[in-house]
Amino acid sequence: MRETILVLDFGSQYTQLIARRVRELGVYSEIRPFTTPIEEIRRLSPKALILSGGPSSVWDEGAPAIDPGTFDLGIPVLGICYGMQLTTRLLGGKVERSEEREYGPATLEVTDGDDLFGNVPEESGVWMSHGDRVLELPPGFKSIALSGNSPAAAMKDAKRRIWGTQFHPEVAHTEYGKEILSNFVIGIAGCGGSWTPRSFVETAISDIREKVGGSKVVCGLSGGVDSAVAAVIIQHAIPDQLYCIFVDTGLLRDKEAEEVVASFRGMGLNLAHVDAGERFLKRLESVTDPEKKRKIIGEEFVNVFEEEAARIEGAEFLAQGTLYPDVIESVSVKGPSATIKSHHNVGGLPEKMSLGLVEPLRELFKDEVRAVGAELGVPPEILGRHPFPGPGLAIRIMGEITEERLRILRHADRIFIAELRSSGIYDDIWQAFTVFVPVKTVGVMGDERTYESVVALRAVTSLDGMTASWARIPYDILEKVSVRIINEVRGVNRVVYDISTKPPSTIEWE
Ligand code: XMP
């Protein structure tokens, strides 16, 4: 049985980070909602439990809680922030309600460096983000660290093997966070740390073989990292049973289709290239509403994919590059959030196809997919590509999509990306692209007055696309890009740089 650390989620923005940090230690970690029944936890037989932080106060009416029996499962428990306050409350200590939050850096003073704080200096920086604080420890517990604001910045009951920290060890600002989590996961819980990309691939391959048997699998490739790595794992498992389909929507970047096809064929994948650009453009004629564009593209994608898949006789499975963040049952603290954009609409499962699903990446975070891809020899030019939305250039052309606008955008985009690559900053940027702005402005070229379109440059840094800052690209690079676009791309006489963060703006303009 694979060693697992179970993280019970109380809705903290850092919950996924806890799982990722544990995995970085070579130990598989899963996130479940705090409502997970105790029998289910037993069935998963984790080596230890981590209770995440969360936005609630233990004093709130209906504050999230767990069965106190969870502490008697015979496995170590670590409560972080809200997790520590809840532990205190459930086990008979006192939590003080506070209207003020302690937020930001603080100094931790370790008073017991035995287990959780082994190899952690007496004083170090930690990251705090809490309202309530522990006032009186539950019976059997002792304080093992102090901070300016908390007499019990961390606590333990060595006998019952329960620990709590008021601060967030999973956050990079906590100087010795990695050591603390390692002390818990490896030292206290006794995990071996053998979960690596290689071991993941071995297990995934045998799982795929077992699931699929002798059947055929159809896989849609988008050119992105996830579908590529999913296909390559399946290829390793069942080389003669995989049929890949690349739907060319006509909304891709310059030369992208050719490059994608060449690199996938180079990896030995059996690939059908469906050139469906005309169909997409026809359906998008005079459509300007972003959500309508997405809907049409999503529908048409499914149509094309289905037609192509129907040619593969006897296909019983559909492969998808679903990732772990899509699978985690999120703890909704404030109710389901409003739909801002209907993402992930393209390449969605055509349910009527009634195929079984193969999702080899369901357990992985994005950075782990890259590591697995590298292990499998997926070329760096595919692994390192910026994310590209399913609806492609359609949502980067404001308003109507025309051949002329596509030409302008492709050309401008090619120049921007080429300059980012040649100046060596492409890999520091999460996503960079150009946007066609259908606004005409006046310019002067030679002695002539011009009246042409605007191209906006968008480049952001981000960890997961959920929040983003605009990339601080050096002025001389921006200048070069601007000069080249205005000189080389017919129909553009003005280039602007988008300096909006997300939120309140989004990364894409539509
Ligand atoms: P936003 O614009 O919402 O984008 O800040 C966040 C991330 O999602 C990508 N994106 C999409 N991906 N279909 C996709 O597959 C879509 O309709 C879509 N819209 C945005 C965007 O490129 C960024 O990485």
Image: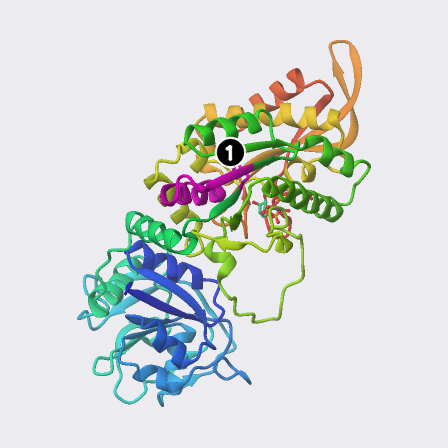
* Residue in the image at 41% along x and 47% along y: 369
Alpha-carbon neighbours of circle 1 within 10 Å: few (<14), some, or many (≥20)? some
179 over 315 or under it: above or below:
below
Quarter of the image for residue 460 reads: top right
In this picture, residue 235 sits left or right of residue 257 = left
Query: Which is more toward the observer, 428 or 329?
Result: 329
Query: Which is more toward the observer, 418 or 47?
Result: 47
Query: Which is more toward the observer, 444 or 38?
Result: 38
Q: Residue furthest right?
A: 286
User: x, y percentage for residue 171?
Assistant: 38, 59
* Residue in the image at 39% along x and 36% along y: 378
User: x, y percentage for residue 150?
Assistant: 35, 75
The amino acid on which the numbered mark 1 sits, given as a three-letter code, is Leu
In this picture, residue 254 sits left or right of residue 156 = right
Query: Which is more toward the observer, 40 or 475?
Result: 40
* Residue in the image at 62% along x and 19% along y: 483
Q: Which residue is mark 1?
A: 271
Magenta residues? 220-245
* Residue in the image at 62% along x and 70% along y: 335
**In magenta stretch: residue 239:** yes
Quadrant for the N terminus in the image:
bottom left
